[in-house]
Amino acid sequence: MKFLRSALTITLCLLLSLTCMLTASAENIKYNLKDLKMSISIPDTMSVRTRDNSDTLSDTIYLEATTADNSLTISVAMIKNEKTQEIYSFENMLYSTLEDYKEQILDNEGYIECKSGEYGGVPFLDFSQKYTTEAGVEVYGKQSVTLVNGMSISITSQSAGDSFTSDELNLIKGCLDSIKFNYVKTEESSTSFWKVFVWIIVILVILAISFLVFSYYMGKRSADKKREAIKEKHRKSNYDVLSSAETSQKKTSPSGSVGGYKSSADYFEEGFDSADSASKKPAQPAQPEQSAPSATEKAVRKTKKAFTHMGYFFSNMKREIDKSKKAKTTGKKAKAKAKKRTKSRDYDVFSDK
């Protein structure tokens, strides 16, 4: 009996050693999942089906790996819809929102606990599962879920009948650590309301500043143009005055002397001319200004003015005398007529009696 027990012990040890050797010598095969834009490595001891080599997978399953004894199954699933596109990534979610999402998953039947993980540089939520099938078989599971690039990706491992062994847990962890993403976007055009609102505010502020700068520039430019126009107007007006004066001087006084204005004596003499003579005489052109008169010329002009004034005086006196004579004659004639009418009336009265 002791010999048999020893033989069985040795046989079991050899089998365990062989199993460990086989496990250690197993190689991992990398599978590229194009639709998910990621890759995952699965040991070659497992049977693997993908969309490329199998048509029996469901719509959401993109890879399924099973051990030879069907004791362990690993599947990779992906869901993409408007909700996943809206949230887009766990990295875009607030911590409170992520905690709410975690609680919603745990409210489902069969989910036990949740831990945080990171695979391929992307945050994951690792859930533990335990539920019973309709046939009464207990199923233990682990599900790692992430939201990346607008897709909800989950890697689910299940063991039917009993819990996971340490070797199975190591195998599952090795598969998760091998995950790599082709690229990871952290932002999407369909962002949250507050992000859009902030961008609108920023754009409005930029537009307001641009409008103020443009208004200031245009106002300054308009003021500069007005100042230049005023300067140009003054410059032209000064130029026109000097030019017209110079032209007038050249026309009236070729010799260079100032002309075109009457002297005070000429103006005084012209002022005492009669209205008839002024109306009959044609307008005389302006005479050039003469040099200052001498003392003799001044005396002659004064004598001439005195005689002119005396002539005006006697003419006016004669005109007044004629008017008075005419008035007297008219008065006498009127009295004679009145006297004649009176006599005639008296005669008629007496003749009636």
Image: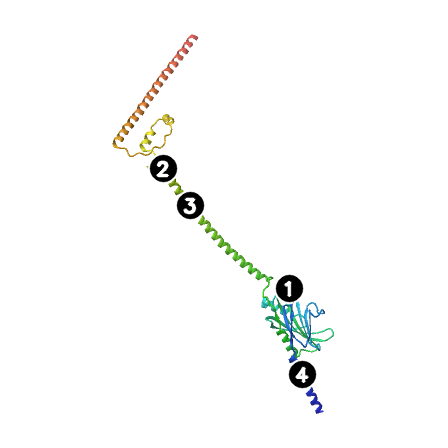
Name the residue located 41 percent from the left edge and 11 percent from the top edge. 344
Residue 126: x and y, percent? 63, 73
Work out whether mark 2 precedes mark 4 in sequence or the reverse, and give the earlier one. 4
Measure how far apart labels 2 and 4 are at the Cα level: 132 Å
Judging from the image, what secondary structure is the residue with disc 3 in? helix
Between the C-alphas of marks 2 and 1, the distance is: 95 Å
Q: Which residue is denoted by mark 4 in the rendering?
A: 18
Q: Residue furthest bottom?
A: 2
The quarter of the picture where the C terminus appears is top left
Residue drawn where x is 49% and y is 53% of the image: 214
Give the secondary structure at mark 1. Answer: helix
* Mark sitting earlier along the chain (2/1): 1
Q: Which residue is mark 1?
A: 83
Q: Single out the mark in the foreground, 2 or 1.
A: 2
Residue labelled with disc 3: 232
- The earlier-in-sequence mark between 3 and 1 is 1
Q: Amino acid at mark 4?
A: Leu
